[in-house]
Image (cartoon, rainbow, N blue to C red):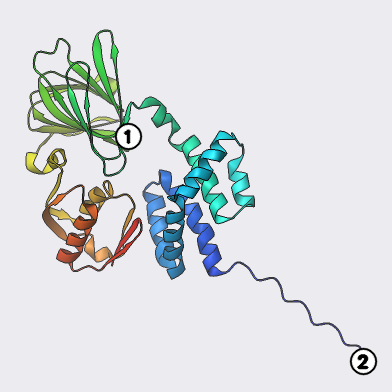
């Protein structure tokens, strides 16, 4: 009787932890240009297994580490091509993160960086004075440029939010461009937010003349607000100065606002991810006045008043 060798066991696949690490690095890239569907899918992945959250936190720390940025700079200088293919074939954490960072810097933000004269990071505000005397306060995560055309000063808000103070007696009105919006103003204080292809104008003082798509025109006066999108103007609204322009004074003010909207606003100032895993909290009404430069303290206060549990990790906060 001949003994037959026992069949060799098939090679095991990657462990759950290793698979989570690979997926976390994928998410780091995908989230740089995330839409609502991406965000929802990320939240589902994050809560699907305990090792997913741990892997994402570790990947985020690696991504922001000095070693990764140094490696990314060296790779960028070498002008390597087909970086995505090499990422897949060399799946070592440090090399992977470095390649992804290099690719992101090269392709993701370059058009915006080339156009902008001034950039603010998440949570930062910056003051700019234009040649004609107008003053600009840039809000968080904003990109801004200005130049002169035909004797007129043109300010371009490429992304984010800005507050303009146009002095009296300027020889030419200030022209502001933001996506579909064209605005002209003299002796006026007003704010423009440009996110997701839509502009929102809020006038605090004076008048602002607006032009939208298809040569639509409207004049806003103090206390007026209107959105301007690819389809034209929205319905004019009245401002709540204390709440709608609170960011100019460094505050976030909410009055009976659903927590889902509050978190959406706080996310603009927090340099990381804020995830709410408790759907019942989304409609809880919130009233409060918070410092916009302390988003983590704001989240702690929100967790307290809603009786939610707050879990804090590097660049990640989870509400349960």
User: Which residue occupies the extreme right position in the image?
Assistant: 1
Q: Is residue 119 at least partly visible in the picture?
A: yes
Checking the image for residue 209, the label placed there is none
The residue indicated by pointer 1 is 197
1 or 2: mark nearer the eye: 2
Q: Which is more N-terminal, label 2 or label 1?
A: 2
> Along the horizontal axis of the image, is 203 left or right of 42?
left
Q: Residues within 10 Å of mark 2 (few under 14, many from 20)?
A: few
> Along the horizontal axis of the image, is 318 left or right of 291?
right
Secondary-structure class at tag 1: loop
Secondary-structure class at tag 2: loop
Q: Quadrant of residue 119?
A: top left
Q: Quadrant of residue 195?
A: top left
Residue 281, how many percent across, how many down?
22, 63
The residue indicated by pointer 2 is 1
Residue 245 against residue 222 in the figure, above or below: below
Residue 152, how many percent across, how many down?
24, 12
Q: Quadrant of residue 244?
A: top left
């Amino acid at each position: 009787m001949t003994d037959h060798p026992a069949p060799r066991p098939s090679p095991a696949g990657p462990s759950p932890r290793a698979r989570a690490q690979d997926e976390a690095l994928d998410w780091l890239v995908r989230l740089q240009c995330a839409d609502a569907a991406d965000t929802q899918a990320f939240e589902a992945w994050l809560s699907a297994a305990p090792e997913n959250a741990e892997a994402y936190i570790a990947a985020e720390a690696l991504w922001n580490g000095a070693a990764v940025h140094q490696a990314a700079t060296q790779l960028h200088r070498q002008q390597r091509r087909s970086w995505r293919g090499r990422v897949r074939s060399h799946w070592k954490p440090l090399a992977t993160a470095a390649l992804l960072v290099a690719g992101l810097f090269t392709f993701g933000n370059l058009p915006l960086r080339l156009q902008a004269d001034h950039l603010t990071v998440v949570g930062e505000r910056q003051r700019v004075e234009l040649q004609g005397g107008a003053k600009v306060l840039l809000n968080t995560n904003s990109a801004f440029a200005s130049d002169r055309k035909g004797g007129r000063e043109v300010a371009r808000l490429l992304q984010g939010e800005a507050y303009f103070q146009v002095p009296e007696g300027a020889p030419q009105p200030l022209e502001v461009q933001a996506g579909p919006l064209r605005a002209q103003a003299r002796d006026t204080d007003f704010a423009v937010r440009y996110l997701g292809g839509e502009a929102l104008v809020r006038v605090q003082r004076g008048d602002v003349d607006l032009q939208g798509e298809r040569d639509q025109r409207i004049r806003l006066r103090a206390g007026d607000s209107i959105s301007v999108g690819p389809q034209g103007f929205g319905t004019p609204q009245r401002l709540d100065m204390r709440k709608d322009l609170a960011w100019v004074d460094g505050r976030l003010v909410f009055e009976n606002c659903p927590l889902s909207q509050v978190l959406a606003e706080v996310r603009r100032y927090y340099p990381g991810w804020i995830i709410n895993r408790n759907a019942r909290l989304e409609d809880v009404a919130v009233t409060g006045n918070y410092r916009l430069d302390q988003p983590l303290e704001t989240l702690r206060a929100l967790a307290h008043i809603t009786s939610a549990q707050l879990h804090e990790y590097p660049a990640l906060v989870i509400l349960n």
